[in-house]
Amino acid sequence: MATTNEKIVEQARVDQVIQNIDQQIQQTKQAIKAAHQETRAVEQNYGENASINRYEIDDIAESRSALEQQRQLVARASENEDILKRQLATLQELRKSPYFGRIQIQEPGSNEVETLYIGIASLMNSDKTDFLVYDWRAPISSVYYNGNLGKVTYDTPAGQQTVKLVQKRQFTIVDGQITNMFDTNETVGDEMLQAALGQQNDQTMQNIVATIQQEQNDIIRNTSSDLLVVQGVAGSGKTSTILQRIAYLLYHAKESLNADQIVLFSPNQLFSQYISEVLPSLGERNMRQVTLTGFLKRRFEGLNVETIFDRYEQQNQAPRAGQHFLESTAAMEAVQQYLSELQTGQQQLSFTNINFHERVFFSAQHITDIFNQQPVAMSIPDRLIRTKNILIREVQKRSRQEAQKDWLQKELNQIDTQAIHRLMGKHTIDDFPDEQAQVRYLARRLAHQRLRVVADAVYNNYFLDFSSQYADFLHHLHWPAAVPTATRHAIIEQYQHAIEFHQLPLMHTAPLMYLRDLITGNGQNRNFQFVFIDEMQDYSSAMLIYLHHTFPEARFTILGDSEQALFYPLQLPEQLLKTVAEDLQAHHPKLITLRQSYRSTTEITNFAKALLPDGQQIHAFIRHGDVPTLTMTYNDQEWAAQLTKLVQQELQSLPTVAILTKNQTQAQKVYHALYRKVSTLSRLTSHDTKLPHRGVVILPAYLAKGLEFDTVILADVSQQSLGKQATGLLYTMATRATHRLSMISNGPVSDAFTETATRQLVVSREAMEKGE
Ligand SMILES: Nc1ncnc2c1ncn2[C@@H]1O[C@H](COP(=O)(O)OP(=O)(O)OP(=O)(O)O)[C@@H](O)[C@H]1O
């Protein structure tokens, strides 16, 4: 234990470091001012240049490239300013708490003990000769997270190094004052973790940099795997860890990686907002974030794609055989097979007409003929490119014919002088021998412009009818025996019916996107270096294969908890790794399992783990709180009264209360029961992007995924409400609570409540007792 004297010495050091930070803050502010002026100057220049060239931009490639150069200058200047601003933010963070750890190490063969301080960012003294603080991501800092005292090894770019760890000290520094400090031999001591977890905060996720645990550190610092699968129980820090990992990767590949080359697939938009503060608090820019729903929406513009949330709303049970097959690896292999049949001509591409002014401009037959004339040995995408080139040349040729047609002459007569001016481009009247020549020129230019829609249609592959192509694929598919013929027909029929109404069931998305990309050779993004997928249990094998196809250069980190799977059957982690590694063709796959749950109190975790058949593998963190409660009610009135009572009771001690339901129908029921009785009440839907700061928030379980709340009420855990096979659902909902969990069952309780789980609860039967 550190002595009072040591504390005085340490506080003096903190004061000194803060003085240094203050100087650097001043310098950075000056630099920002200068950078801002620079940005303004470049922007102004850009604005002027851009406006001069606007009328000519159509024609002059040169002005385009000049503009591009200007745009890059602006981007660079403002990036420079952004970097400085982030530096300032980091310095301001450091000012509050310059560091959280100190290690004393001894190099082999040396008697000298070196003392290093570790914080969220590195900080040098004024003359840049010494590190006052080491970044937590520096190679040497891993000693702090991984090692017990004694001999410790750590990785550096030059290979593994060994040192003797002589002492490890942890600090809590609040607003420049050491509030707690102790020496420890553990990975990162319990006391600090207790303090971090005991806090109340369910608005935004915090970084865990000061208390990263050893097994989490392995995930954060892994750079050798192209596929990292993390299977972690609820609340084991999967999300926290990957955000730290992103910060780590950004630090380690500073020169070759930036935040825009990392994408995180998050479970819902609330989650995106919930985690949005973590990276900035570590001085890094946020990675790209997307939900699966958002991703699919962008890939199927114009179609209403069934969302994972729709599925949660509609479905109770495991997927049926047909859907199961379309979402499997086998379906994606079938797409590849179908493509090779298209290649050899066993199957035909579905072309469609390109229309212009409500008449057929290029008929499907004409396009088919051109395509069929291309060498069979060429890949389909290459044959399509040649087809497109031929079509574009035809458009150009035909624009001369169109220029003489009535419709065009009519339009030409109607356009205003400014439009004429634009059509003339760099030409003047003097360039033409007579007026007729000028009119002919203008007609050609106008026709060329009007036919640009046709050229665009060709360019964008609008002559390919992917919907029918995919229907054809479904017809030719070798369905497994588990899918009866009647079901196959029904699936195809439903698909065609849905497409007619511009809808697309989720089960078709991966094979359809894959088919489309393989045919066109488009859809791949080589810019992304890392893809993170949270809540992998929501992703089918087919979707993972597609994501791998679409991000071919990326390394994948996939996180999940198969216990929280609401649709897919439970898989053992090793089996899961094998399947995913095959799907993603990984060369260096690695599985890391997290079994310690940090989020909830011991009492809540003990209840949640008792719900699961293999729950004994989950370790509850020892942080005590109230025993979770279950209240039985026997009719709607009693239920509503009990819910109101509970909410009001909880609101007395905490500013926010989360009420979780199975779906929106139940969320509505809760809303009706409470509105008029509770002043700040919000019901969230999948379109919401922000959690309210105060009051009662009602949301279905699938929107609470990945989130946590200080106090959680499960509105109705009866058998009737949760339905069959509700273990995963109940487990997911219960594990959202950090401090308090209460449940109400309106009628007999769900059979997901095992006997051991029920023994972990305080059960009351108020209504029955009153009624007796
Ligand atoms: N090493 C740690 N130090 C401090 N807090 C931690 C640590 N690890 C996890 N936590 C806290 O535990 C809680 C759960 O973490 P997180 O949300 O990352 O878990 P998860 O595994 O993604 O959970 P789930 O799958 O249930 O959504 C968070 O409040 C997080 O801050």
Image (tube, rainbow, N blue to C red):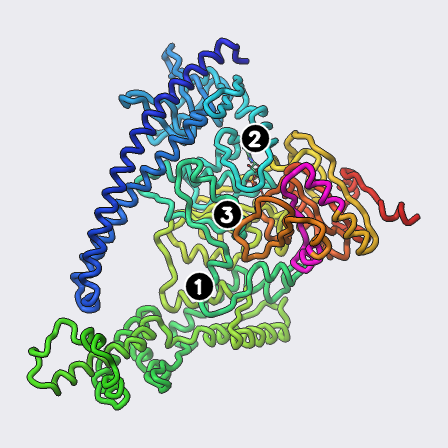
Question: Whole-Å distance between the Cαs marked 1 and 2?
Answer: 41 Å
In the picture, the disc for residue 763 is none
Instruction: Please say whether residue 206 is visible from this viewpoint.
Output: yes
- The crowd level at tag 1 (other Cα within 10 Å; few <14, some 14-19, many 20+) is some
Q: On the image, which quarter does residue 113 sit in?
A: top left
Q: Residue furthest right?
A: 772
Residue under label 3: 273
Look at 37% across and 56% down and name the residue there.
525
Mark 2 = which residue? 196
Residue bearing the label numbered 1: 299
Question: Is residue 67 depicted above or below 163 in this figure?
Answer: below
Name the kind of residue labelled 2 in the image: Ala
Q: Which residues are magenta?
A: 645-671
Name the kind of residue labelled 3 in the image: Gln
Q: Are marks 1 and 3 in contact (CB under 8 Å)?
A: no
Disc 2 residue crowd, few under 14, some 14–19, many 20+, Cα 10 Å: some
